[in-house]
Image (cartoon, grey):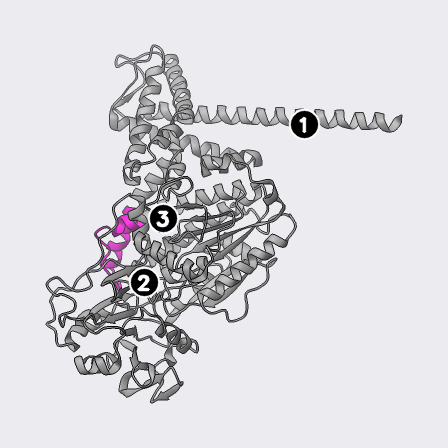
C-alpha cells in the first residue's frame, strides 16, 4: 500500500529530525558549558595575577602548564560545587534572617572556592578568607554573565535560564486543565501616577522602553481616581479583597482599644485583611490558584511569599520569606544583588550629598537607615519579586499579583520627578521586560496587566514651609504646651515594613498614641497622626466620634486655627445638626449631607470627585474626630505632607489621586471615569472571568529584546 509506505517514511524522517535536534541541543549545551568553564578559568588566572593574597602556584614559581592546569581544574571544581552543593546550603538556611543570609552568601561562596582549590591534586594554591570571598564572587558573576550572553542567542537555553532564576518551585508542572486558558499577571508599580508613566513612555527614547512598546502595540493606558485615602494599605486591600471600608488612612487611632493601626505592620495588615474578608465574605482576588508576591495582603492566595499580612506564619506555601531563599540559591545572582545593594547605598549617599550641595528645595533628611531601606526596595525586593513572579509564570499559576515598591520609596525622599526616580523607572522597566519574556516559555498564555495604587504629589513639607508641625499646631490650639522636639514617627512607606519582615526583625511595638507622661482619658492632648498630606486628630477623652460642638466647648481655639491656616485646605468634622461638614478658611463650609455650600467651597481646589470621596470616608466608624487635608496649589498640584516626605500620598490634591491601568486590548476596557479602588477590583474580577472564557492562544505580550 503506497499510503502506508509514505506514512512509514514520514515517521522515520520525523524521528531522525527529532534525534538530530536532540544532538544539536546537546552539542550547544556542551559548548556553553565549555565556554563558561573557559571564562571561569581565565578569570581565576587573572585574579591570581592581580591579587597578592591569591596564588594558584607555589611561592618559588612553577611552570605555566602547571598553573594553567590548576586554574582549569579549580574553576571546574568550583563550578560543579556551585551547581550541586550551593542550592542545598541555601535551603538549609531557610530559618536564618535574610540580613544574615546576605552575609553568609559571600562566606559560603568563598568556602566553596577554598574546597575546590583544595580538591585539585598537587596544588599549591593559597587564598586568604577575604580574598577567597572576592575571588568566588567575581568568578560567579563572570560565569553567570557568560551563560546569560550565550542564552540570549538560544531560546531553549533562555527558558532554562529563566527557570534557574525563579528557583526550585518551577520544577512542578502546571495542572493540565489550566493550560487551556490564559492566566493573568497583575504587576503593581507602586506609587507611579498616570502622568509619570505617560511621560516615561513618551518620545523617541523613552525612560521605560519595554512599557512603551506594550502601550504602542498590545495595551491601552487608562487613568483612574483613588479614594481620599490614597495609599497602598487602603488601595491594595480593596484591589485584592474587594473592600477598603473603614480604612481612613495609612495609620489611625481606634478609641475602643486605645491603639494605633498602621498598615505596614504585620499584625495590623493581618487584622485589616481579616476585617475585609469578614465584610465581603470572599477570600479575595487570588483565591483560585493565585499567588501573592511582595504585597501587604494575600488576596486569598494559597501561595504567598514576601507578603506582610502573613510575615509571621509558617507552613507549606505560607513562608513569606521563602522567595528570598529561592532567589539566593544561585551564588552568582546572590553576588550580583549584594554588589548592587552596596552600589545603591553609595549612589543614594552621593545623590543626597549632591542635592544638599546644590541647595535643592524642597529637601528632607536622607540619613539614618534610609540608604539601606532604599537599597532594599530598589534592589533586593525588586529582584526577588521579579524572580518569584517568573517562577509563577513558568509554573502556570492562574493569577499572580505582585508589587514592586522601588519608585514609591525613592520618590518619598527625592521627589516624584528627577534623575533619582528616572533611574528607578528604568530599572522597573527591565523587570517588566523579564516578566514579559518569561510568558513566552510558560505552559499557558498570559495577559500582563500593569497598574498602580496611587501617584505622588510633590511639595515642601508642612513643617518646613510653616516652621511648625501639625502636632505642634494642634497642641497650640488645644492650649497644651508645645514641646521643642516633636516625636518622630516612622514614615508611612510600606518598604520599611517589608524590609523589617525580610530581615526577620520583630514587629515594631505599637506607637503610643499620646506623648510620654500624658495618659489618655484624663484631659490629655489630642492624638495627632499623619498619612502623607492627610492629618488625623482624635480626642481620647471624648467618647465616640466627637462632634463640632464637643470640640468647640473643649478647645474653642482649635477649629479656627486649623481652618484658617494657609497650609490647610479643609477640615472634616461631624456637626451635631448638619452631619459631616467640611470647614474652610473665612468661615466657608460644605455640608456633605445636603450639599449646601456657605462661602467659597473648600473642596473646589481638589476636583469634582472630592465631595464624594470625603463623604464616603466621613461615614467610616474609625474616621478621626477631625480629618485635616493640606492645601493644594491649583497650578502645580503641590501639597504639604505632614510627614517628612517631599513626594507624598495619602490625601487629596495633585497627581497622587491619579493612578493608572495598562491593560491588554484583548480584554474589555475599564469603564470611563473609574473611581475608587473597589471599582478597580470589580474590573480585575471581570478580566479574570474574561480570561477564563478565552481559548488557549499565544500571549498578548511580546518578549521584547534590547539591542
Whether residue 428 appears in magenta in the rendering, the answer is no
Residue 71 horizontal/vertical position (percent): 38, 19
- Res 417 seen here: no
Q: Residue at x 39, y 25 (%)?
A: 85
What x and y, as percent, mark residue 596? 38, 87
Say which of 553 and 468 sits in front: 553
Which of label 1 and label 2 is nearer to you? 2
In the figure, is residue 521 to the left or right of 350?
left
Q: For this rendering, which residue is in front, 688 or 380?
A: 688
Residue at coordinates 48% horizontally, 52% vertically from top-left? 286
Tag 2: Cα neighbours inside 10 Å, few (<14), some, or many (≥20)? Answer: many
Report, in whole angstroms, how far the alpha carbon at label 3 lies from the one at label 2. Answer: 19 Å
Q: Is residue 330 visible?
A: yes
Residue 682 horizontal/vertical position (percent): 51, 63
Residue interval drawn in magenta: 345-374
Measured as percent of width and height from the top left, residue 434 is found at: 49, 45
Who comes first in sequence, dot 1 or dot 2?
Answer: 1
Dot 3 or dot 1, earlier in sequence: 1
Q: Residues within 10 Å of mark 3 (few under 14, many from 20)?
A: many
Question: Which numbered disc covers residue 250?
Answer: 2
| Number of marks present in the image shown | 3
Q: Which quadrant, please, contains the N terminus? A: top right
**Position of 410 relative to 703 (above/below):** below
- Examine the rendered structure and indicate whether residue 513 appears above or below residue 123: below
For mark 3, what is the residue?
310
* Residue of label 1: 18
Amino acid at each position: 500500500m503506497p499510503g502506508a509506505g509514505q506514512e512509514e517514511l514520514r515517521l522515520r524522517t520525523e524521528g531522525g529530525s527529532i534525534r538530530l535536534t536532540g544532538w544539536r541541543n546537546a552539542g550547544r549545551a556542551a559548548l556553553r558549558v565549555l565556554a563558561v568553564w573557559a571564562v571561569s578559568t581565565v578569570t581565576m588566572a587573572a585574579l591570581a595575577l592581580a591579587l597578592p593574597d591569591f596564588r594558584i602556584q607555589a611561592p618559588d614559581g612553577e611552570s605555566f602548564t602547571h598553573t594553567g592546569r590548576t586554574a582549569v581544574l579549580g574553576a571546574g571544581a568550583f563550578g560543579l560545587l556551585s551547581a550541586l552543593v550551593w542550592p542545598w546550603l541555601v535551603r538549609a538556611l531557610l530559618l536564618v534572617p535574610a540580613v544574615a543570609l546576605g552575609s553568609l552568601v559571600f562566606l559560603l561562596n568563598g568556602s566553596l572556592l577554598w574546597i575546590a582549590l583544595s580538591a585539585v591534586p598537587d596544588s599549591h594554591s593559597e587564598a586568604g578568607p577575604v580574598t577567597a570571598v572576592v575571588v568566588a564572587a567575581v568568578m560567579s558573576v563572570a560565569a553567570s554573565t557568560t551563560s546569560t550572553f550565550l542564552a540570549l542567542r538560544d531560546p531553549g537555553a533562555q527558558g532554562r535560564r529563566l527557570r534557574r532564576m525563579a528557583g526550585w518551585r518551577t520544577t512542578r508542572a502546571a495542572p493540565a486543565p489550566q493550560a487551556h486558558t490564559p492566566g493573568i499577571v497583575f504587576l503593581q508599580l507602586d506609587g507611579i501616577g498616570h502622568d509619570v508613566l505617560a511621560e516615561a513612555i513618551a518620545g523617541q527614547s523613552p525612560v521605560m522602553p519595554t512599557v512603551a512598546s506594550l502601550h504602542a502595540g498590545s495595551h491601552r493606558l487608562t487613568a483612574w481616581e483613588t479614594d481620599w485615602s490614597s495609599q497602598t494599605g487602603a488601595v491594595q486591600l480593596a484591589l485584592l479583597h474587594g473592600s477598603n471600608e473603614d480604612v481612613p488612612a495609612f495609620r489611625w487611632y481606634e478609641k475602643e482599644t486605645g491603639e494605633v493601626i498602621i498598615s505596614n505592620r504585620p499584625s495590623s495588615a493581618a487584622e485589616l485583611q481579616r476585617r475585609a474578608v469578614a465584610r465581603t465574605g470572599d477570600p479575595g482576588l487570588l483565591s483560585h490558584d493565585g499567588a501573592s508576591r511582595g504585597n501587604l495582603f494575600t488576596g486569598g492566595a494559597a501561595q504567598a511569599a514576601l507578603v506582610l499580612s502573613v510575615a509571621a506564619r509558617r507552613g507549606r506555601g505560607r513562608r513569606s520569606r521563602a522567595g528570598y531563599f529561592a532567589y539566593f540559591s544561585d551564588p552568582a545572582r546572590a553576588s550580583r544583588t549584594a554588589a548592587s545593594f552596596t552600589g545603591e547605598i553609595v549612589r543614594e549617599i552621593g545623590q543626597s550629598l549632591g542635592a544638599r550641595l546644590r541647595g535643592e528645595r524642597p529637601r528632607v533628611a536622607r540619613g539614618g537607615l534610609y540608604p539601606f531601606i532604599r537599597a532594599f526596595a530598589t534592589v533586593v525586593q525588586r529582584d526577588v519579586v521579579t524572580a518569584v513572579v517568573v517562577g509563577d509564570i513558568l509554573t502556570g499559576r492562574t493569577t499572580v499579583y505582585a508589587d514592586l515598591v522601588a519608585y514609591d520609596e525613592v520618590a518619598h525622599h527625592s521627589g516624584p520627578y528627577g534623575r533619582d526616580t528616572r533611574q528607578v523607572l528604568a530599572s522597573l522597566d527591565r523587570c517588566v521586560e523579564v516578566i514579559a519574556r518569561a510568558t513566552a516559555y510558560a505552559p499557558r498564555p498570559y495577559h500582563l496587566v500593569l497598574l498602580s495604587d496611587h501617584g505622588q504629589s510633590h511639595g515642601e513639607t508642612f513643617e518646613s514651609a510653616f516652621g511648625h508641625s501639625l502636632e505642634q499646631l494642634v497642641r497650640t490650639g488645644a492650649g497644651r504646651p508645645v514641646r521643642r522636639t516633636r516625636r518622630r514617627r516612622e514614615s508611612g512607606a510600606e518598604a520599611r515594613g517589608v524590609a523589617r519582615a525580610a530581615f526577620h526583625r520583630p514587629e515594631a511595638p505599637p506607637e503610643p498614641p499620646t506623648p510620654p507622661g500624658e495618659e489618655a482619658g484624663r484631659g490629655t492632648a489630642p492624638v495627632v497622626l499623619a498619612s502623607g498630606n492627610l492629618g488625623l486628630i482624635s480626642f481620647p477623652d471624648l467618647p465616640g466620634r466627637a462632634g463640632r460642638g464637643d470640640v468647640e466647648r473643649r478647645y474653642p481655639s482649635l477649629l479656627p486655627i486649623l481652618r484658617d491656616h494657609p497650609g490647610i485646605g479643609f477640615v472634616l468634622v461631624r456637626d451635631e445638626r448638619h452631619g459631616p461638614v467640611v470647614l474652610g478658611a473665612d468661615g466657608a463650609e460644605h455640608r456633605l449631607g445636603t450639599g449646601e455650600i456657605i462661602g467659597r467651597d473648600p473642596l473646589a481646589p481638589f476636583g469634582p470627585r472630592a465631595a464624594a470621596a470625603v463623604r464616603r470616608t466621613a461615614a467610616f466608624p474609625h474616621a478621626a474626630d477631625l480629618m485635616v487635608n493640606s492645601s493644594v496649589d491649583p497650578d502645580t498640584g503641590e501639597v504639604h505632607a505632614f510627614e517628612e516626605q517631599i513626594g507624598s500620598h495619602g490625601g487629596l490634591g495633585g497627581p497622587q489621586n491619579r493612578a493608572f491601568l495598562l491593560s491588554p486590548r484583548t480584554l474589555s476596557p475599564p469603564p470611563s471615569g473609574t473611581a475608587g479602588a473597589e471599582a478597580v477590583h470589580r474590573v480585575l474580577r471581570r478580566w479574570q472571568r474574561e480570561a477564563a472564557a478565552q481559548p488557549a492562544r499565544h500571549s498578548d505580550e511580546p518578549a521584547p529584546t534590547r539591542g
